Amino acid sequence: MWITRPVTVVVIVAILVLGAAAGITAKLTTDNNVAISPSKTCHPQHAFVPAFFYASGIWQQAAETKPVPSYMILDISGLGAGASPVGHFQNIVKKERAAGVTILGYSSTGYGTRPLSQIEADVRHYKAWYGVTDMFLDEVKGISSQLPYYRKLANYIRSTNPGTSIWINPGDFPDPSYMSVSNVVMAFEGPYAAYHNIDVPSWVFRYNPDRFANTIYATSGSQVNSAINLSKTRNAGYVYVTDGTGGNPYSALPTYWSAEDSVITQGCPNSAP
């Protein structure tokens, strides 16, 4: 699940960005002293940023990144789309989309206990107020007994917005049946210290990497290389790494954001095995 944050106007910008980055031919050292070395595993990746911030300047920083992040996750109220449109975010969404960023609307499912009608309202409001049709469903247990709840929700989202992309966030590997209701699964959310110890189920490797995302926080500049390379071996097509810590590690972009984005989006060399 996402780290708890104040229920005020907040944003989970998940700039799903790690654009095609997996086996870099030469070791790169950036001006932020972030070193990224070649990986033995090469598959395209896209960077994304869960950014719990309001300030226009941070959104602008993301939009001006070259290349721009693929996705950003918009959370208006800490729960979903809120009760009415917010002009501040309407303007931001227009600018981000003009820059080439895809916006995901955030909606908490309360671990399968939030009434479907409330989430369905979020779906309608994101579309009507912000022109956002792709959804990020947070607080998912990922257990088989709750699959009917999420299947019904996914069917509603796709009938309302044909062609939509649905992300779910169990923060771990869910029951494999959840692959049938989601386009992307947030298969890890946690600190770098815990990232070394996770076990990846064998079934994960039957899917394309772009079906999985990893969020790794509390990661120093000297650890970024390891985090990104580990994400490749774990079949993650979408990755976000940040040095943010505390109750809200997503309150700003990481201090090494430009370097991280640049390296991740370089992609696989033509000579990669």
Image (cartoon, grey):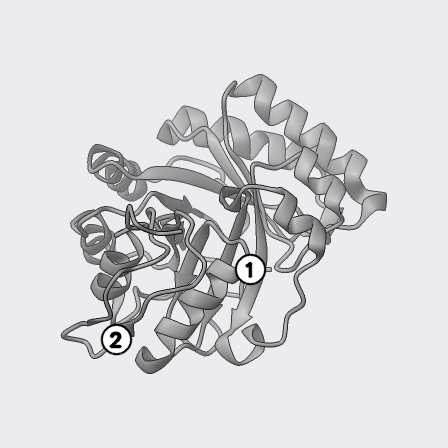
The N terminus sits in image quarter: bottom right
Question: Where on the picture, by quarter, is residue 27?
Answer: bottom left
Q: Secondary structure at mark 2?
A: loop
- Callout 2 touching callout 1 (CB < 8 Å): no
Q: Secondary structure at mark 1?
A: loop
Q: Is residue 243 visible?
A: no
* Percent of width and height locating residue 3: 53, 66
The answer to which of marks 2 and 1 sits earlier in the sequence is: 2
Q: Residue at x 38, y 79 (%)?
A: 223
Residue 271 in the figure: left or right of residue 40: left
Q: Is residue 67 above or below residue 156?
A: below
Under mark 1, the amino acid is Arg
How many numbered discs, if any?
2
Q: Is residue 28 above or below residue 115?
A: below
Q: Mark 2 sits on what residue?
A: 34
Q: Residue at x 14, y 74 (%)?
A: 31
Report crowding for label 1: few under 14, some 14 to 19, many 20 or more residues within 10 A (C-alpha): many
Q: Is residue 81 visible?
A: yes
Report crowding for label 2: few under 14, some 14 to 19, many 20 or more residues within 10 A (C-alpha): many
Q: Residue at x 42, y 74 (%)?
A: 226
Under mark 2, the amino acid is Val
| Along the viewing direction, whichever of 160 and 166 lies nearer the viewer | 166
Residue 119 in the figure: left or right of residue 71: right
Give the spatial CA distance, label 2 vs label 1: 21 Å
| Along the viewing direction, whichever of 168 and 90 lies nearer the viewer | 168
* Percent of width and height locating residue 191: 51, 75
* Percent of width and height locating residue 207: 60, 42
Q: Mark 1 sits on what residue?
A: 234
